[in-house]
Amino acid sequence: MKTINLISVDDPAEAHLIKGKLMNAGIDCFLTNENMTTLAPHHNLFLNSGIQIMVMENDLAEALKLIKDKLEPQQETYTCPNCGSQNIALRFGKRKSWKIFYIFIAIMAAMPLGNLKPKYYCNDCNSEI
Ligand SMILES: [Zn+2]
């Protein structure tokens, strides 16, 4: 019988939560690549890195139903705590030019780009959320 990579996640805690959920439903599974992902977390699922949750081929359909919320992107709306606006954007800094600056610095310092985490900003009052 074949094992199939159900999903890859970059967080060990999330991987164990999914594993627990599957085991509770009676689906056997195991994690691979956990140690390497813990050592190099900044690779953020680059080239299929990340903790892979493996299930048996005949359990795949039921397992996919259980992790349906992880597979479909969640449409979330955010509200600015300062002005109540919903005009929120995900970006690297308060100004758009910061993104180019950050990428330039990351390349010059040979720093993995995964360390650059964008944050949510309000487009109306320009505050970080
Ligand atoms: Zn605001």
Image (tube, grey):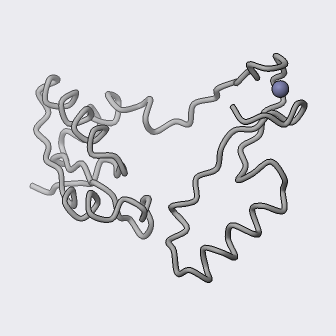
Residue 47, quarter of picture? bottom left
In the rendered structure, the answer to whether residue 28 lies left or right of residue 94 reads left
Query: Can you say whether 38 is above or below 85 in the image?
Result: below
In the rendered structure, the answer to whether residue 51 lies left or right of residue 56 reads right
Extreme residue in the right direction:
124
Residue 98, quarter of picture? bottom right
Position of the C terminus, as image quadrant, is top right
Residue 57: x and y in percent read 19, 48
Q: Name the residue: 26% across, 57% down.
A: 38
Number of numbered discs visible in the structure rendering: 0
Query: Can you say whether 31 is above or below 21 in the image?
Result: below
User: Which residue is at the front of the view, 113 or 54?
Assistant: 113
Q: Quadrant of ligand 1?
A: top right
Q: Name the residue: 60% across, 73% down.
A: 106
In the rendered structure, the answer to whether residue 97 lies left or right of residue 109 reads right
Position of the N terminus, as image quadrant, is bottom left
In the rendered structure, the answer to whether residue 71 lies left or right of residue 63 reads right
Residue 5: x and y in percent read 27, 54
Residue 77, quarter of picture? top right
User: Which residue is at the front of the view, 29 or 1?
Assistant: 29
Q: Name the residue: 57% across, 30% down.
A: 74
